[in-house]
Image (spheres, grey):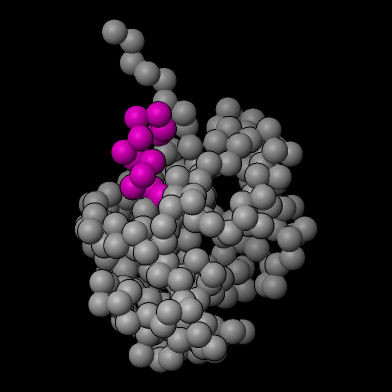
Amino acid sequence: MHDIIKEKVLLFWSGGKDSALALHYLKKDPKYEVIGLVTTFDREKNLVEFHGIPDSLIIDQANMLKLPLQRIFLPPDCSNEEYIEHVGKILAIFSKRGIKTVAFGDINLEVIKSFREKMLLNLDMKAIFPLWGKNTLELSREFLNTGHKALVTSIMTDKLDNSFLACEFDHSYIDRLPSDVDPAGENGEFHTFVNYGPNFKMRVAFSKAIAVQVGPYLVSSVKEP
């Protein structure tokens, strides 16, 4: 019997729970082989925008996942045009190497999905969305039930109070979310930092930083311990 030739996939990695669960789905699918992670950073702060995750901890996550990491540094307040220019330049290199599939952890925001698909089409690449269209409450429960661990690093202050920040994302956290907040934070209500999961060889060590207001978010960045 011949081995099935797997489709090589780059996964966009925010360091949060949706990208971690997307990785979990891809790893279980015999069709795909994840060959690396791609993370975008604010180049002035050296952080994943609004997530409060520094470059150093994204590198630690990639090491624990045993996956190569491609970092892309974006200008502050990056416009869509600037994003396409900077990200497109890097993805074009992968496309020329024959890597034609890029995965994202988006769940149900059609405008973002369309934006990503259009950008990749121009690079002769395609976008896949392992979590697309699934129930966000069920996905959040599944994230936890599969053994993932995450910390909530930022909250939208007009949606959530301080008791929802810098604490573990667990079943009781989901239970106490207000009814107008998506259980996966899919509308940007909160962001997370994953420090362990079934694909990690060890936990990622971190400590919490003081919370600061960044636009609509209160961000409690994580940092090296």
* Residue extending furthest toward the right: 81
Between 63 and 172, the residue placed more toward the observer is: 172
32 part of magenta stretch: yes
Q: Position of residue 94 (x, y in %)?
A: 59, 37
Magenta segment boundaries in residue numbering:
22-33
Nearer to the camera, 206 or 116: 116
For image coordinates 70% across by 38% down, the residue present is 121
> 31 above or below 130?
above
One can see residue 221 in this view: no
User: Residue 42: image x %, image y %?
Assistant: 60, 69
**38 over 169 or under it: above or below:** above
Image quadrant occupied by the N terminus: top left
- The total of numbered circles placed on residues is 0
> Is residue 118 shown left or right of residue 95?
right
Residue at the far front in the pictured view: 179
Asked whether 105 falls inside the magenta stretch, the response is no
For the point 57% across and 75% down, which residue is it?
A: 45
Task: Give the quarter of the figure containing the C terminus.
Answer: bottom left
Q: Position of residue 108 (x, y in %)?
A: 53, 57
Vertical comparison of 28 with 175: above or below: above
Residue at left 77%, top 58%? 81
Residue 91 visible in the picture: yes
Q: Is residue 79 left or right of residue 174?
A: right
Residue 176, percent from left and from top: 32, 82
Instruction: Give me the residue at 42% from left, 67% from top.
Output: 184
With 118 as the anchor, is 40 left or right in this view? left
